[in-house]
């Protein structure tokens, strides 16, 4: 039977009839404003019916059980039940009933069993409403919500969700069977919770796609082709301080974890769903442990007598993308620069768009990021004007992320056509003052790319205009190390060496 289309989502007639029957049998109904009338809505699958009695037994008959044999008292030498594993995950319930949030009741349970078998870690889960969730992540470290209808939280719950995520919690949101109203509402809620860090699609080099399996490509069910023709995994997220705190799956994972056979649904194939789920749980668990070690942040305030004149003053570039990856890394670098050189610094760095008329008030710009981005034509023109009139841009690929690295090079080629990066040679003045640098210790993640070498030569690139440096760029991460907290997935220099190199870059920029 050929599928027909309902709201742009192809479903078999038999499937829709089964859903309609199940909803009427179970007493469920469609709620106003739940998204069920929107394009792309996919209803939950029908509940499994209780099997009928055996054919040789009439409907009114019953079994008369015989008494079982007497129980044997357990001896003291017999093994006791093992202790219950720690509860790491919480399934969020829904006002639309279990058929919405628990349509595949064994999804998370099966995934955790797979995680136990492959990674030798044992976790349990529980189910709670969002009202029952504690803002302290120690009480419910990782939240999981799958659904078909709109996901919504009130203003107080948004505040609690923000506090929970900033304190180290993680939330995983899954569009049940690819139901678009749930996906759209999840994006909307997260953008309201974090207006300063909008939800963005995670690039292929994000560590979540390589945390356990390397997933550059995945297998989708044929139904996905109605809305997406690629083979890359599609996850969106909110990233704060190099940690993706909220993860949204556009396509259904739950029907791969608790298998439902239907090629027409908007979902991953079971093997890809399980691999992606393993990666998500591995990433969330690892970053949870890292966050516990990284909760305290240092606050910096300018001395009242420090003015912009005669001090180190840097403005951070705002662009349409993940432009702010760390919140105090640059301030910690400026503090170290002040200690090393005695030069007054402005800790409260300005954040500015390239089209701001006050751009030239800052002699040095700083730019960083994780993900791909593209500058607008007027931003390209403004940055070109700034650099060709004596301004300096210092940039780094935070965590050594390739997505930012590729985009930064492409955008700079548009800003300064005909120019190219040159690697600074060993012994370059930038590597001599105030710190003599010949090698840099690196994180274990980066060491893997260098035959597990614990240290490498510093990698700094520059672009010159008329013999003067206009751009100084590090394709290896530094900001996380400036905060003394590079995470386990970070391709970065280690803390002390990253600060030394950063101080040298600032010194070189002030004496060029």
Image (spheres, grey):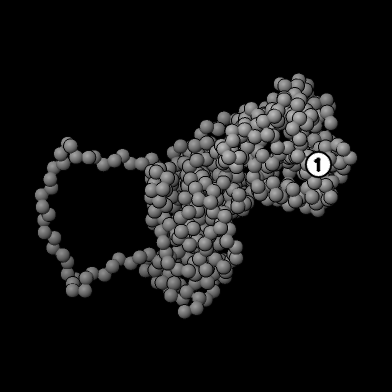
Residue placed at 40% from the left, 43% from the top? Answer: 121
Residue placed at 74% from the left, 32% from the top? Answer: 426
Rendered position, 344 above or below 40: above
Measuring from the top left, give residue 171's x and y in whole percent.
51, 47
Residue 511 sits in quarter: top right
Measuring from the top left, give residue 355's x and y in whole percent.
81, 46
- For residue 492, side relative to residue 285 (left or right): right
- For residue 446, side relative to residue 31 (left or right): right
Residue 326 sits in quarter: top right
Residue placed at 78% from the left, 41% from the top? Answer: 422
Residue placed at 73% from the left, 47% from the top? Answer: 408
- For residue 225, side relative to residue 463 (left or right): left
Residue 76 sits in quarter: top left
The one nearer the camera, 153 or 382, is: 382
Residue 146 in view here = no
> Where the C terminus falls, by quadrant?
top right
The residue where tag 1 is placed is 463
């Amino acid at each position: 039977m050929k599928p027909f289309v309902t709201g742009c989502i192809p479903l078999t007639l038999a499937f829709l009839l089964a859903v309609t029957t199940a909803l009427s049998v179970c007493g469920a109904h469609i709620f106003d404003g739940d998204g069920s009338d929107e394009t792309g809505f996919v209803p939950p699958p029908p509940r499994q019916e209780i099997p009928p009695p055996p054919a040789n037994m009439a409907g009114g008959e019953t079994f008369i059980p015989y008494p079982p044999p007497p129980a044997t008292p357990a001896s003291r030498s017999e093994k006791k039940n093992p202790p219950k594993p720690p509860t790491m995950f919480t399934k969020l319930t829904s006002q639309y009933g279990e058929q919405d949030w628990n349509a595949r009741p064994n999804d998370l349970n099966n995934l955790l069993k797979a995680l136990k078998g492959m990674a030798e870690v044992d976790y349990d889960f529980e189910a709670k409403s969002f009202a029952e969730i504690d803002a302290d992540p120690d009480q419910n470290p990782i939240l999981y919500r799958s659904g078909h209808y709109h996901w919504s939280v009130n203003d107080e719950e948004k505040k609690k969700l923000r506090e929970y995520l900033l304190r180290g919690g993680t939330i995983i949101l899954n569009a049940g069977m690819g139901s678009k109203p749930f996906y759209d509402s999840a994006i909307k809620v997260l953008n309201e919770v974090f207006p300063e860090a909008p939800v963005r699609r995670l690039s292929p080099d994000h560590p979540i796609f390589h945390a356990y399996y390397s997933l550059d490509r995945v297998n989708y069910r044929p139904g996905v082709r109605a809305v997406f023709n690629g083979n890359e995994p599609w996850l969106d997220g909110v990233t704060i301080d190099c940690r993706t705190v909220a993860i949204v799956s556009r396509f259904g994972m739950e029907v791969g974890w608790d298998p439902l056979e239907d090629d027409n649904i908007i979902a991953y194939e079971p093997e890809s769903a399980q691999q992606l789920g393993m990666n998500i749980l591995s990433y969330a668990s690892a970053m949870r442990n890292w966050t516990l070690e990284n909760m305290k942040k240092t606050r910096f305030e300018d001395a009242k007598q420090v003015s912009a004149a005669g001090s180190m003053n840097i403005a951070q570039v705002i662009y349409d993308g993940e432009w702010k990856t760390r919140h105090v890394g640059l301030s910690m670098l400026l503090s170290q620069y002040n200690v090393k050189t005695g030069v007054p610094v402005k800790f409260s760095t300005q954040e500015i768009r390239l089209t701001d008329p006050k751009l030239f008030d800052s002699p040095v710009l700083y730019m960083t990021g994780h993900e791909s981005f593209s500058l607008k034509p007027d931003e390209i023109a403004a940055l070109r004007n700034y650099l060709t009139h004596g301004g300096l841009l210092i940039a780094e690929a935070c965590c050594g992320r390739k997505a930012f690295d590729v985009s930064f090079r492409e955008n700079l080629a548009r800003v300064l056509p005909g120019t190219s990066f040159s690697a600074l040679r060993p012994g370059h003045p930038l590597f001599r003052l105030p710190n003599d640098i010949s090698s840099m210790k690196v994180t274990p993640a980066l060491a893997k790319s260098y035959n597990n070498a614990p240290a490498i030569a510093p990698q700094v690139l520059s672009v010159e205009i008329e013999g003067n440096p206009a751009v100084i760029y590090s394709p290896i991460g530094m900001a996380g190390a400036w905060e003394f907290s590079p995470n386990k997935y970070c391709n970065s220099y280690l803390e002390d060496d990253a600060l030394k190199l950063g101080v040298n870059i600032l010194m070189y920029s002030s004496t060029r």
